[in-house]
Amino acid sequence: MPKIEVSDLPVTSRETTTGLTSYLLSPGLLRNMQPPNEDGLRYIVGRAFADVKDSGTVYVEFDANLGTYRAMDLYKKLSPGPALYRNNGDSTWSPASHNSLKRPYPQAGETDTHVPAKQPLTSSLSAHEATTRLLNDSLLTMHPLMTLGQRVELLRSYNLSPRQHIQLHSDLTANPRVMPAWAEQHHIRSRDVNDATRFDQLHEEIEPLLLPVRNGTLRSDLVDFDKSVTGEFLEAFLTRLGYLRNSSDCLYRTDIPGLFRADERTPFEFYNDGRMLPRLKHPRGATTGKPISATVSHRLVKMYGGRGTEAPDPQYLRYNSQRNKYPGRKPGESDNDSGESDNDWSDASDIELDDERNYETTRHNQQFIFSYVIDTRRMEVVLNEENHLLNPAALEKNAWFPDDELEALISTSKRGIESERLWLLDSTFTRAAKVDDVAALAQSSYIGSDIEARTHSGVANQREYDALIDKVAKAGKPILSLPSGKDWFANDIVWPE
């Protein structure tokens, strides 16, 4: 960002400071959002957000005509909101009615309209800023009779990569009347489905971003990437990258090695049922089948399931098993005669469910959560971060994702996830054994039910499960190793033979 100069803005009417209500984000969307950077902006998957002083947080986009950011509706249902300016000596922003605001760019002079001068071309111009200027400046000069929508479609038809947008802006700044030859050549090549090179430039720029974005180690500055190329070109490019599109219009992959999940259910329950059934209260929307949420991050599952840091959800502990259709009641509670099941998926499942009511709960005192690694090879996995980056239209259609960052949804059949895909992590989170191997060994020793009963009664007996994993390893069964000292992610998992 260019050098910032501080100047006073004239006070305008109070109405201009109160137009942010419709743009303020809900608290759930702010969870795990990074703090403001040196420019006063917070980022999630390439989208910029600003903390408005004494108001809340809003999604923002840069407006080249105003030379600053303005509040926008994340779901594109509202017209652009008020322009925002950086507060002097602070990381917060305010509408233009506040005094002593940092303007993002030097001013050519004050006028009655208070419109800042345009930012000079710099080598640090982002792709989003270049695209904005191409639409509102360069292409407007070339095609003064075109509407903004027509200029958008014209630029999309060239199927340019983000860096090519920056190059095109630079070339048209030097020669504003002629589209450069390289752009015209790319325009033709990109529309030729038989040209094996038509995706090369885009692939070179986008493919290296995928894993870092998926893992949360990179916040890409790509904004509305899906709207910068034609729909046909985008779909073909996404296919080349390995993505498929499901009936919910979300992108998914079938080559994710594994995901991590924290869960209050014991390995014995999964082994006895032969599967992990979907949890309660997981809305439909993003997956083809029933969703089971998980995370790509070993660090996060360690936080969710770490000893003493997280307790099981009391709602889930009202079910003695995942096959209970209705919640039970703790000792001393009155009967619950509700005619509706709390299990969202009970009627859709082909698993025989227990429809008993008002049974006495046995696990309401359980104190800790288990952590699992799920073998997701050849399963539909919908990745949150990549849909934000490559497919934000899915969010506009209200596709549901968990609030937590680095989340993924596994699409399952009515029978859930087979227990043979589930691996139990030990309390050090450095190794895991198959749930089936752990439970079978315990039951062969007639100790499985005792260990599970102690867990349900509230005993912190994680070490008993660690001992079972030790025995599984000594028996020569496969063990997944995740040594400490490395931040493991989904694509780092290499399953033992």
Image (cartoon, helix red, strand yellow):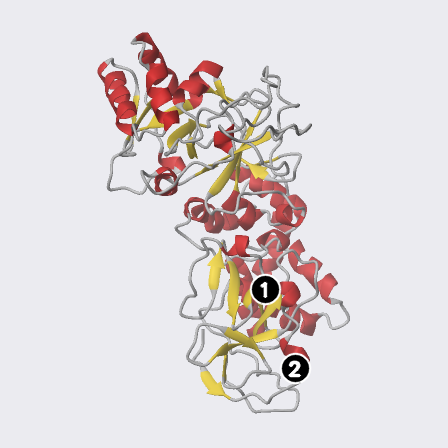
| Rendered location of residue 382, percent (x, y) | 54, 37
Count the numbered circles shown. 2
Q: How crowded is mark 1: few (under 14 residues within 10 Å), some or many (20 or more)?
A: many
Q: In which quarter of the image is residue 419?
A: top left
Distance from disc 1 to disc 2, alpha carbons, whole Å, reads: 33 Å
Q: Which of 408 and 236 is in front in this view?
A: 408
* Residue at 63% across, 36% down: 284
| Rendered location of residue 157, percent (x, y) | 67, 54
Q: Is residue 399 left or right of 46 when viewed as pictured? A: right
What's the residue type where badge 1 is placed?
A: Thr
Is residue 424 placed above or below 106 in the rendered structure?
A: above
Q: Which of 62 and 442 is in front in this view?
A: 442
| Residue 340 visible at all | yes
* Residue at 41% across, 47% down: 212
Q: Is residue 295 left or right of 8 when viewed as pictured? A: left
| Residue 14: image tag | 2
The residue carrying mark 1 is 131
* Residue at 50% across, 75% down: 121
| Rendered location of residue 412, percent (x, y) | 56, 26
| Residue 331: image tag | none
* Residue at 73% across, 62% down: 149
What's the residue type where badge 2 is placed?
A: Arg
Secondary structure category for the residue under label 2: helix
Q: Is residue 28 left or right of 344 when viewed as pictured? A: left
Is residue 220 placed above or below 69 in the rendered structure?
A: above
Front tag of 1 and 2: 2
